[in-house]
Image (spheres, grey):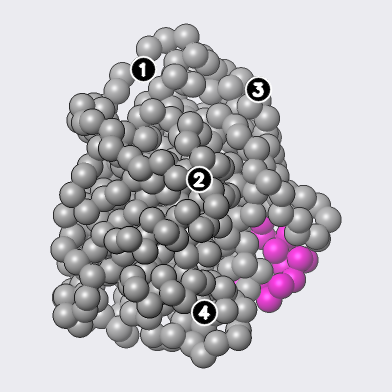
Amino acid sequence: MKYYSTNKQVAPASLQEAVVKGLAADRGLFMPEKIKTLPAEFYENIDKLSFQEIAYTVADAFFGEDIDAETLKAIVYDTLNFDAPVVPVSEGIYSLELYHGPTLAFKDVGGRFMARLLGYFIKKEGQTDVNVLVATSGDTGSAVANGFLGVKGIHVYVLYPKGLVSPIQECQFTTLGQNITALEVDGTFDDCQALVKSAFMDEELNAKLNLTSANSINVARFLPQAFYYFYAYAQLKKMGKEKEMVICVPSGNFGNITAGLFGKKMGLPIKRFIAANNRNDIFLQYINTGVYTPKPSVSTIANAMDVGDPSNFARVLDLYDHSWEAIKSEISSCSYTDEQIAETVANTYRDTKYLLDPHGAVGYRALQEGLKPNETGVFLETAHPAKFLETVERIIGVSVEIPQKLQEFMKGTKQSIELGKDFAGFKAYLMKK
Ligand SMILES: *Cc1c(COP(=O)(O)O)cnc(C)c1O
C-alpha cells in the first residue's frame, strides 16, 4: 500500500519509506491511501477473539500487502505481550487501561510496534545504521527508548524539555544506556519537536546520518494504536454495553485519537469521540470557531498533553476532507484547568476508590459532564497514576504504591547531555556523531 503526504506536494511513498523517513519531504504527514472496512462477521464475532487476534486483523488491513503474514503476526503478538482491560469506574463510564505495558503508558503499543517493524526493514535490506530522533513531553521518550533498547543497527536520541517531565518519566529514558542517548533541552516540548523537524529538513545532516522519527507522526507508531479501540469494543460487547459507545481520548499531539478515528472509518461502531484537553485548548478553539490557531504550550499537571500545535491535526483535517462541519459532527472537545483535574482525581478516588492519573482524569471528567442518556462512555486511561507520583499523592493525600516495573527504572543512574534550544547547537552535536 502507498502512503501519501497530507501536503500532497510529493509522490506517495512505500510503507518502508514512510516508516524510515517519518515525515514526508514536503513536511506533510504520511497517510495510508486506503482505509479498508473490516467485514461484518469480524464485528459480530469480535467478543470471542483475543487482543492479539483482533490486533492482527486490524494490522493486516494496513500492513498486510507489504509484510508477509508470519512476520506481521510475530510483530503484533510480540508487541502486545500485555493486556488492556476495560474496567468499570462509575455508572456508564469505563476506563480502558492502557498502562499495563513495560513503561506503564499507552505509548508502549506504538513504540514497541515501530521498533519491531523498523528492525525488520533494516535486517531485510541489510541497511546501514538508522538514527531515530524522538521529542518527548514525558511518555513518548520512555516508550520509544524501551521499545528500541538493544535493537541492532538503530540508535535513539530522546529530546526532552529540561525540568518539565516528572522524575519517574525522566529515569525511564535517561538510565538505559546502550543505544539510547537522552538529550536534555533547555526549552519546552514544542522546542524539542521543532529541533526534530528541522533536523529532518536539513540536507547536510540527512546526507551524513540516516535519520528517522519515532514521534506519533510516524505511521508505524500511530496506526497500531487503533488496535485497542477494537479491543475495547470487544470487551464492552461481551458485557452487552457496546451500543452508543462514546470514546473520550485525553489528547496532546492527537496521534492516539487519530488512530481511533481510523478505527471508526474501518467500521468500528463508535458513536462519537471527545478530545479532552488540559489548558492547551487549541483543538477546542478550532471546534468552536473553525479556525486553527497554534499557540505556545503552557505547562500543566497533565504534562504529556502540553502541546500547543498538535502534529496530527493535519491527519484529522485530511481524514475529514478539511471539513469543519464533518469534524464537529464526530468529535467534540473540552478543556480543564489544573484545579479541575486535581478535583476530579480527588473526588473520583473518594467516591469510587478508582485512582486516575492526571491525563485520564481529563477524560473521565469529560464523560461525566458530556455523556447523554443511553450512551456508554469509555475514556482512555493513558498512563499509570504512579508515573505522576508527587502530583497524585499531593492531590489525594495518600501514598501511592509504585509498581515493580517502575521501581526497576528508578534504580539506574541518570545519563544525559544538555543542549540549548537553537538548531545550530543541536546540528553541531549530531554532525560529530
Ligand atoms: C502522550 C500522552 C497523551 C497524549 O497522546 P497524543 O497521542 O499525543 O494525543 C496523553 N496521556 C499520556 C499519559 C501521554 O503520555
Label 3 environment density (alpha carbons within 10 Å; few <14, some 14–19, many ≥20): few
User: Of 231 and 332, which appears nearest the observer?
Assistant: 332
Residues tagged 1 and 2 counted as in contact (Cβ below 8 A)? no
- Judge whether residue 308 is colored magenta: no
User: Of 185 and 309, which appears nearest the observer?
Assistant: 185
Answer with mark 1 or mark 2, whichever residue precedes in sequence. Answer: 1
The residue lying at 37 percent from left, 64 percent from top is 431
Across and down, in percent, residue 179 comes to: 22, 54
* Above/below status of 159 relative to 212: above
Depth check, mark 2 against mark 4: the one in front is 2
* Above/below status of 69 relative to 88: below
Across and down, in percent, residue 198 comes to: 53, 64
Answer with mark 4 or mark 3, whichever residue precedes in sequence. Answer: 4
Q: Label 4 is placed on what type of residue?
A: Ala
Cα–Cα span, label 1 and label 2 = 35 Å
> Which residue does the numbered mark 3 point to in the structure image?
339
Depth check, mark 4 against mark 1: the one in front is 4
Q: Label 2 is placed on what type of residue?
A: Gly
Q: Using the image, tell me which numbered label, if any, was put on residue 25.
A: 4
Label 4 environment density (alpha carbons within 10 Å; few <14, some 14–19, many ≥20): some
The magenta region covers 319-332
Instruction: For mark 4, give the secondary structure.
Output: loop
Cα–Cα span, label 1 and label 3 = 20 Å
Q: Residue furthest top?
A: 397
> Which residue does the numbered mark 2 point to in the structure image?
420
Mark 2 CB lies closer than 8 A to ligand 1: no
> Which residue does the numbered mark 1 point to in the structure image?
400
Answer with mark 1 or mark 3, whichever residue precedes in sequence. Answer: 3
Depth check, mark 1 against mark 2: the one in front is 2
The residue lying at 75 percent from left, 59 percent from top is 292
Quarter occupied by residue 364: top right
Depth check, mark 2 against mark 3: the one in front is 2
